[in-house]
Amino acid sequence: MGMPLYTNIPSIVGDLLTDVKNGRIGLPDLQRPFVWTDNKVRELLDSMYKGFPIGYIMLWASPEEYTRMNHIGKNNKTYSVPDDLVIDGQQRLTALQAAILGIQNKDINYNERFKKISLNPLKDEFQVWSQAYERDPEYISAISEVFQAEENHNVSKFRREYIKKVNDAREKNQKLELTDDEEDHIEDSINNLLNLKSYSLPTLKISAKANEEDVAEIFVRVNSGGQKLTEKNFIETLLAVFDNTVHAQINKFCEESRIPADGTAYNQILKVDPAHLIRVAVGFGFHRARLRYAYLLLRGKNLKTGEITEETRKENLAKFKDALHIATNLNNWHSFLNLFAEAGYIRGDLVASSNAVVFCYVLYLIGKYEYKVPSPELRKIIRKWIYMSVVTHFYTGSTESEVEKQMADLRDIYSADEFVKYLESVIRGKFTDDYFEYTLPNDMITSSASAPSWNAYLAAINVLGTPMLFSTIPASKFMILGSNGTKNSIDKHHIFPKHYLETIGVGNDRDRNQIANFTYLDYQTNINIGEKAPSEYVAEYRAKMGEEIYLKTCTENALPHEFEKLDYFTFIEKRRKLMAKIIKKGYEKLCE
């Protein structure tokens, strides 16, 4: 057995925070900025207060030649260069330093947004600071005040002042003063809070003999149980180890990818994160779908021979960087996103799976750069592919396995024509007559507001330019979110109103909220219809619009003839089939 590269050091929170404060513990350049939410900091303190375990800390005794490191926190440091670097546990130490010591992180975004943590000693309750807790006399506005009082040997004075403040407020509100038991509880609570500095936090210390690659490997192996979330972090760590410019490029694109470029709209489809880009780069550059391949490739593994070499690592990193350069080209990105809108998916909430966006982008880039498919032809086939893949859940479930098969198929394709014909054949295999006649209507037997079949119906009416029910304005004009990305200008409406259904004996929400019972209406129409019976409001709009226009709007919105006279369950069964036909019609429009 080889000699271990680490030692196990029993540690407590107070000692670790002292080392962070004076600069003995710092961060290697491969670590991420602070990303925890305020609530997660509150939950961490609550877990410690209740005696729950919060994991362990992993440190690296920094080698003499290693210079890429930073301190944690904005206070003056005793150590000009850290002795130990945090490899795992950065978020916890940063959170505890800010909450307990009141010292902010070096990252300015964190410094601007982090709120203090408040404590109600009477209820043993932590809360994220707000003006409400600042004004509430029963809350200690910031727990760091208690630790500061301890440092100044003024805890007793702090407790007396707190008790006086509570009693003054109770007297003002004509309530009884604190009882002896309550005052004892306050003392116990403050002592329990201060005891958090004695909280045991197991620490592993990696030897200075370990290099950056060893550290990345240890980080991966120790955390290998986490799977999806940690896979991304492993890869980001490797990218930071081997080429920090790549890490910066990814983060920069994640910020810029939602901002409108020249002639483009605000990106409402996907908030890009590093894992998405890593998938795109590996899919486009190496024709691989599994995220774990990114880790193996960046470690220098030849996926054909299984051999790991430094030469292969350099070659793979260069190939990865080339693919990433193309993937992060904002012209490519926005041109691709426009295809989602052209396929009817004009909002992110219509696309249930982020994988659909990621892997459709991979296909778009492969078609453009490898097969050099002419732009009009490429745009047309990718539009159709997007439409098919979203409605058929192509990229949900065992996504990586399915895409791996697809990438294997592409290895036998050598021309633009073959590429287009291959995608066409897959689409035809999914969009059969039986699919539209039977499978799709059955998929609509659901009350799920985010069902792909419902979103596909909305995409279809966007493609077809269908006016909203009882309107002459295309529904797509109302569905587009405002520039702030948060507000719609229409309402989702029950065609057979919920209250009306209840009066006729349909009391189950799952039955009443079937997607076939929904349509979009503008605010005023929705208010006018309210809870009226279909027979009542149909008569009003039929007379108002005229017979020809009324029948046309019913047909375009998949409403059965004389639907207001139908039994409710007969209505939704008929409408599912009509909605499926609308989705098919939308696809046929994309084929023109």
Image (spheres, grey):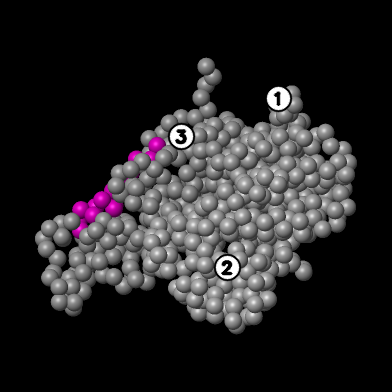
- As helix, strand or loop, the secondary structure at mark 2 comes to loop
Q: Amino acid at mark 3?
A: Leu
Residue 247: % across, % down:
66, 48
Picture layout, residue 292 above or below residue 263: above
Residue annotated with mark 1? 306
Picture layout, residue 347 above or below residue 309: below
The first of marks 2 and 3 along the sequence is 3
Q: Circles 1 and 3: CB distance less than 8 Å?
A: no
Question: Residue at coordinates 18% horizontally, 56% vertically from top-left?
Answer: 185
Q: Label 2, label 3: how many angstroms apart (C-alpha)?
A: 73 Å
The first of marks 2 and 1 along the sequence is 1
The quadrant holding residue 209 is: top right
Picture layout, residue 181 above or below residue 195: below
> Is residue 188 part of the magenta span, yes or no?
yes
Residue 526: % across, % down:
52, 75
Residue annotated with mark 2? 562
Picture layout, residue 435 above or below residue 525: above
Question: Residue at coordinates 77% horizontally, 68% vertically from top-left?
Answer: 262
User: Is residue 528 in view?
Assistant: yes
Query: Mark 2 or mark 1: which is in front?
Result: 2
Stretch in magenta:
186-202
Q: Amino acid at mark 1?
A: Gly
The first of marks 1 and 3 along the sequence is 3
Side of 412 relative to 129 (left or right): right
**Mark on residue 204?**
3
Query: Mark 2 or mark 3: which is in front?
Result: 2
**Mark on residue 539?**
none
Side of 106 relative to 275 (left or right): left
